[in-house]
Amino acid sequence: MAPANEPLPGTSDIWEPDVREWVCLETAARDIFARYGYGEVRTPIFERTDVFVRSLGDETDVVQKEMYTFEDRGGRSLTLRPEGTAGTMRAIACRGLADGEQLRVFYMGPMFRGERPAAGRRRQFHQVGVEAVGGSDPCEDAETIAMLVHYLDAIGVQGGRVRLNTRGVPEDRAAVSAALRQHFEPQAAAMCPDCQRRLSANVWRILDCKNPACQALVDGAPKMVDLVGAESRAFFAAVCRGLDQLHVPYELAPRLVRGLDYYVHTVFEVVHSGLGAQDALAGGGRYRISLPGNKKALDGVGFAAGMERLLMARESLGLTAQARAAADVFVVALGDGAVVAALELAQQLRRSNAGLRVLAGLGARSMKAQMRAANRAGARWALIIGDNELTAGTVVCKNMAASQQESVRREAVLDWLTAASRA
Ligand code: HAM
C-alpha cells in the first residue's frame, strides 16, 4: 500500500524547478492568446452536475464513467469540472451575451476525471483552453487552430500534427447514424460489449473506441465528410481553405469525432510522437451548447491542451527546467542580538530594486550550520553579522565561490553586492 503521505494515484505534487516550467506554459498562453483578443476567465472548480451532463452528453465516457460527483449538504449533485468548456459556457450564459456579441476567453487550471492513471493520463490534470463564442464563420475555426499551432511553437513544442474532421450539424445526425449503423451492425459479433450497446445507444461513440477489434472495423467505416449534408461539407471546405491560406499544415482524419457530444462541424486534435499511447496534446472544435436557463444555444469554437502532456512533449524534445538556487544572498546571524539585525538587513535588500533573493539564518544556529544552509540554498554571497559587527555597524561580506571576504559598512552592503554581481 502506498504511504499515507503520497498524493493519490493520478495526482501529483509539483515542485521547483518543475513549477517554473508550468509558469512558462502559462505565461506563453497569456501572451499568445492576448494577441488574438482573448481575455482570461476563472470559473469555479465545481459546478452543478447537470452543467456537464447536458453539455458533454450523457452517453459520453466522461459523463458515464469519469466524473467526480458528490452531494453537498443540501443534497444537490455537484461535480468537479472534468473539462473547461461547459463551465465557461455556464458563466457566459450567466453574464449574458447580447445578440451578435462575440466573446473570446481563455482559462487554465485543474480538471478532474476518474480515469485509470497511466503516463499522460491523470485524475487531476491541467488544461489551458480557449473559447471564442458567438460567431459562426468557418474562418474562426481556422484562426483558432492557427493560434494553437502558434502557441505550441511559442513553447518550443515542434512536431505536433493537426488532425481535422467534420461532424456536421445536428440535422445531419440521423443520416450519419443510419449509415454508421448499417456499416457496424453486420459486424456486431466482433465488437466489444460496450460497442454492441453503443450500436443502439449512440453509434458515434464506436468511432472513439480504443479496443483493437473495434478499431479495425472503424478503419473501414464511411468517412464523415461523405455522410454529412451539403451545408456541412461547404463549411468544412471553408475551414480547410482558411488553414491553407494561413499555411497551417493539417491531416484529414475522416473518422475523428472526439469524445464529447457538443461538437458540430469542425473537430480537431494535435497529436505528438513524444507522448506514447496518450498522444493527444490538445483537442477542440466547434460546438453548440444549450444550458438550463439559457434561451438560446451558444455557438463557439475552442480547444484545450493538456499541460502535463505539453510538458511531456517538451521533455521529449530535451526542453526541461534547470534547477535554480533558492537564494542569492544568505545573511548569517551569530548571537541573539544579531538575529533581528540580520532580518532587518535581509528585508532591506529584498525591498531594494536589485531583485535579490535573500534568506536569513533565523533560529540562532552555529556558524557552521548556517554556512551549510547557505550552500544548500545555492547562495552566491553570505553576509555575516556577529556581536563585533553589530557594535561596529559593519557586515562581513563573503563570496561563497571564491571564499574571499571583507568587512563592509552596513549602509554600503547593497553597493558591494551590486558591484560583486557585475564582476
Ligand atoms: P479533451 O480532448 O477531452 O477536450 O481534452 C483536451 C486535452 O486535455 C487532451 O487533448 C489532453 O491533452 C488533455 N487531457 C484530457 N484528459 C486528460 C487526462 N485524464 N490526463 C491528462 N491530460 C488529459 C476538452 O476537454 C474540450 N473541453 C476541449 C475544447 C475546448 N473543445 C472546445 N473547446
Image (tube, rainbow, N blue to C red):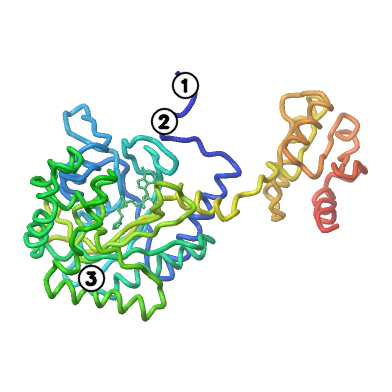
Q: Quadrant of the N terminus?
A: top left
Q: Amino acid at mark 2?
A: Pro
Q: CA distance from mark 2 to mark 3?
A: 40 Å
Decide which of tag 1 and tag 2 comes sooner along the chain: 1
On the rendered structure, is 306 left or right of 92?
right
Which mark's residue is nearer the viewer, 2 or 3? 2
Which residue is located at x 72 percent, y 24 percent? 363
Compared to 97, does 86 lie above or below?
A: above
Q: CA distance from mark 1 to mark 3?
A: 49 Å
Using a 10 Å C-alpha cutoff, classify the residue at mark 2 as few (fewer than 14 neighbours), some (14 to 19) or many (20 or more): few
Name the image quarter holding residue 255: bottom left
Identify the residue position indicated by label 2 in the image.
9
Whether tag 1 and tag 2 are in contact, CB under 8 A, the answer is yes
Q: Quadrant of the C terminus?
A: bottom right
Whether tag 2 and tag 3 are in contact, CB under 8 A, the answer is no
Q: Where in the figure is residue 111, as x and y percent of width and height?
A: 35, 43
Mark 1 secondary-structure assignment: loop
Which mark's residue is nearer the viewer, 1 or 3? 1
Which residue is located at x 24 percent, y 42 percent? 47
Q: Where in the figure is residue 120, as x and y percent of width and height?
A: 43, 44
Q: Which mark is residue 135?
A: 3
Mark 3 secondary-structure assignment: loop
Which residue is located at x 26 percent, y 58 percent? 256
Identify the residue position indicated by label 1 in the image.
2
Task: Answer yes or no: disc 1 within 8 Å of ligand 1.
Answer: no
Q: Amino acid at mark 3?
A: Gly
